[in-house]
Image (cartoon, rainbow, N blue to C red):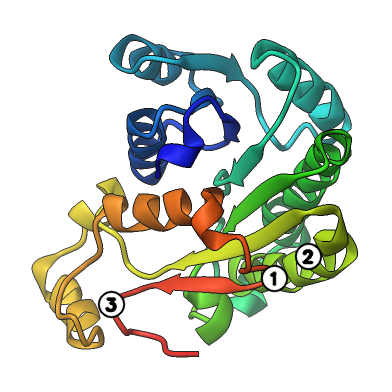
Amino acid sequence: MSDLKGKNIIVTGASGGIGNSIIEKLNQAGANILASGTKIEKLNVLKNKFENIKILKFDISQSDKIEEFIQNATKELGGNLDCIINNAGVTQDNLAIRMSLEEWKKVIDINLTSTFLMSKSAIKKMLKNKSGRIVNITSVVGHTGNIGQANYTASKAGIIAMSKSLAIEYAKKNININCISPGFIKSAMTDKLEDKFKEIIISKIPSARLGDPDDVANAVLFLCSNQSNYINGETLHVNGGMYMA
């Protein structure tokens, strides 16, 4: 993916497992990266580990400051924005009849509304460049549903529909907007699962294994590159065949 050399890319949720892998792959491809997250100590680890990394602490729940964040992040990158990967998100699981309005709103506001606002602000920058890429990270459960995650699944399904609408609006402006929908990926959360639960999950995956963060990062790399020029408004499923659209 040599065409990413020198490209200015923002990655939110950069300090998690998938975020780390995305940063590593983009760094290997020679991109200029602005890594964002809520934990400055983890961001500093990334800055010390990789070249061409700039960091900016930001909580995407601060919806009224998102445009300012995009402005500051773009300035840190030198004034232009080629791509943004909206990877940040939260969960607040509960059965539907026990789920409070606050639990519902928190997940919808952060995962869906903030992703929309990040995309909106990024598009303004990309229109000036007359090109751009947006990659929104969703989830397999946004397609299948999941027990105890009515808020999370709704937010992820909403991102998919929103991304299609934005893709239609700005395709003629040479801005491609796509989603990546990971399945069950190895993480600190899956490491804590008991073996019997892991076995149940894996039994539902045709590839018979959990995904690696690199599997998602490789998909991000592809959608950021010119090799995906004619792909727009799509969702790339990275789930080992667990869900086939």
Instruction: State whether residue 146 is above or below residue 104.
Output: below
Kind of residue at disc 1: Gly
Residue occupying image coordinates x 54% and y 61%:
228
Give the mark nearer the N terminus: 3 vs 2: 2
Give the mark nearer the N terminus: 3 vs 1: 1
Secondary element type, mark 2: helix
**Residue 208 spot, x, y in % from top left:** 14, 80
Instruction: State whether residue 149 is above or below residue 74.
Output: below
Secondary element type, mark 3: loop
157 and 190: which is toward the camera:
157
Q: Residues within 10 Å of mark 3 (few under 14, many from 20)?
A: many
**Residue 237 spot, x, y in % from top left:** 45, 74
Kind of residue at disc 2: Ala
168 and 153: which is toward the camera:
168
Dividing the picture into quadrants, the one containing residue 174 is bottom right
**Residue at which label 3 appears:** 240
Residue occupying image coordinates x 28% and y 77%:
240
Kind of residue at disc 3: Gly
**Residue at which label 1 appears:** 233
**Residue 177 spot, x, y in % from top left:** 69, 59
Q: Which mark is residue 167?
A: 2
Give the mark nearer the N terminus: 1 vs 2: 2
